[in-house]
Image: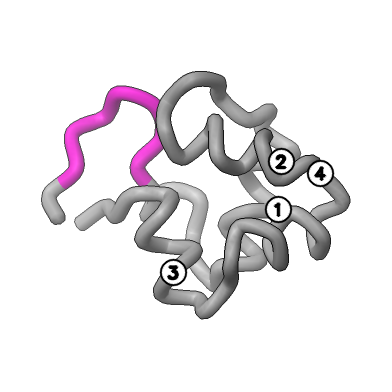
């Protein structure tokens, strides 16, 4: 079952600012990824998944259907 990027972040216990700081990217980048306005590069997507303790395939990316 896939979870949304926002749910992955919240479940991992990070705020937008904390995740952005740890990844060295702008807070609005993560906001835009979570709201489907832009898509992260494969490199950033993998780093997000690693930070959140998930496999990259467990996260809902862009317009994929989410079961939760």
> Is tag 3's residue or tag 4's residue first in the polypeptide sequence?
3
Number of numbered discs visible in the structure rendering: 4
Tag 1 secondary structure: helix
Q: Label 3: which residue?
A: 10
What segment carries the magenta color?
60-66
Circle 4 Cα neighbour tier, 10 Å, few/some/many (<14 / 14–19 / ≥20)? few
62 lies left or right of 13? left
Q: Quadrant of residue 50?
A: bottom right
Q: Label 2: which residue?
A: 44
Q: Nearer the viewer, residue 63 or 46?
A: 63
> How far is disc 1 from disc 4 in space, using C-alphas?
11 Å
State whether the magenta stretch is mostly helix, strand or loop: loop
Residue at point 33% right, 49% down? 4
Q: Nearer the viewer, residue 66 or 26?
A: 26
7 lies left or right of 33? left
Q: Are marks 1 and 2 in contact (CB under 8 Å)?
A: yes
């Amino acid at each position: 079952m896939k979870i949304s990027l926002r749910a992955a972040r919240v479940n991992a216990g990070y705020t937008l600012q904390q995740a952005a700081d740890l990844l060295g990217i702008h807070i609005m980048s993560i906001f835009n990824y979570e709201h489907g306005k832009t898509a992260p590069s494969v490199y950033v997507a993998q780093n997000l998944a690693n930070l959140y303790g998930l496999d990259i395939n467990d996260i809902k990316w862009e317009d994929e259907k989410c079961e939760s």
